[in-house]
Image (spheres, helix red, strand yellow):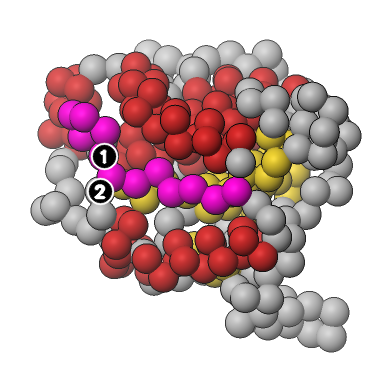
Amino acid sequence: MTTAPPSTGGEEPPRPAAPDGAADGSPGRTVAFTVATNGYDQTFADCLESQRAWADRHGYAYLVLDGAPPGGIDGAESAWLKIFAIRELLDRPEVAHVVFLDADATVRPHAPAAPTDAGFSILAARDHTGRYNSGVLLVRAADDARAFFRRLCRMADVPPVWLPKRDRNLWENGHFIYLARKTGAVGDLDPQWNFTSGLEAPGGPDGWVEGEEYVCHGRGRYLEKPRTGPKPGRWAKALRRLRRGSRTLRVAGHLRHYRPKLHAAAAE
């Protein structure tokens, strides 16, 4: 018998975002960050520099969660770390907006400030499959966003095979797709902000062409990712997962390691 993913309370209608500003009533900080563990900070140094330059141009705090916490961190845990880190930042009273960018995402020099006037607190672009790609996320510090990421964190131990087939994807992306579909809490971000592999620029007099995107994500750069050896088989992965224990607890432990950097960025 297949076990269903944790209940999200059923289908919910889209909810509008809260007004701009931090919880303390000030304009609040925008914090942009990436996760570049296990050598990604070196492999994608040019991408990270483009992200930092964009953040500096628009007055955003920027940080890289790099290196590795004690005991190491694997690829799946690194992917889930961004979800836990977003939740952590949203709970900081100084933070009004959070921008997440995958380490292999290049922000073009002509990229404007992140849009903050959409009718949703969470924005993500769709890839060539028509599903959300969580490699670029724009999040407003509103109650519905906090609730969404808390619920998503609680799904870290749900195996991808327990998700509906139409939602399954790499690492945490399938869980994000599933919860977005169930809650209606995520709005569509223009793909110009996340131009991923397989997408084509719309062109035309009212569109944009390749090279005019704001964020070029992946599009072959994933082939440069550091690899320690051949990918383990299905059963080897399952056995390794059992040995490592609860992913939720492990990622929560990693978050404690990176928390000082997150809090420092929020308070800049």
Number of other residues with Cα within 10 Å of mark 2, as a class: few under 14, some 14 to 19, many 20 or more: some
Pointers 1 and 2 in contact (C-beta within 8 Å): yes
Q: Element under label 2?
A: loop
Q: Is residue 56 above or below residue 160?
A: below
Q: Of the residues shown, which amino acid type is indicated by label 1? A: Ala
4 shown above or below 221: above
Q: Nearer the viewer, residue 40 or 59?
A: 59
Residue extent of the magenta highlight:
61-72
Residue beneath label 1, please? 68
In the depicted view, which residue is nearer to us: 108 or 224?
A: 108
Q: Position of residue 223 (x, y in %)?
A: 30, 67
Observer-nearest of 138 and 199: 138
Quarter of the rendering containing residue 207: bottom right
Mark 2 — residue?
38
Residue under the point 69% across and 17% down: 10
Q: Is residue 209 left or right of residue 251?
A: right
Q: Amino acid at mark 2?
A: Asn
**Is residue 70 among what the camera can see?**
yes
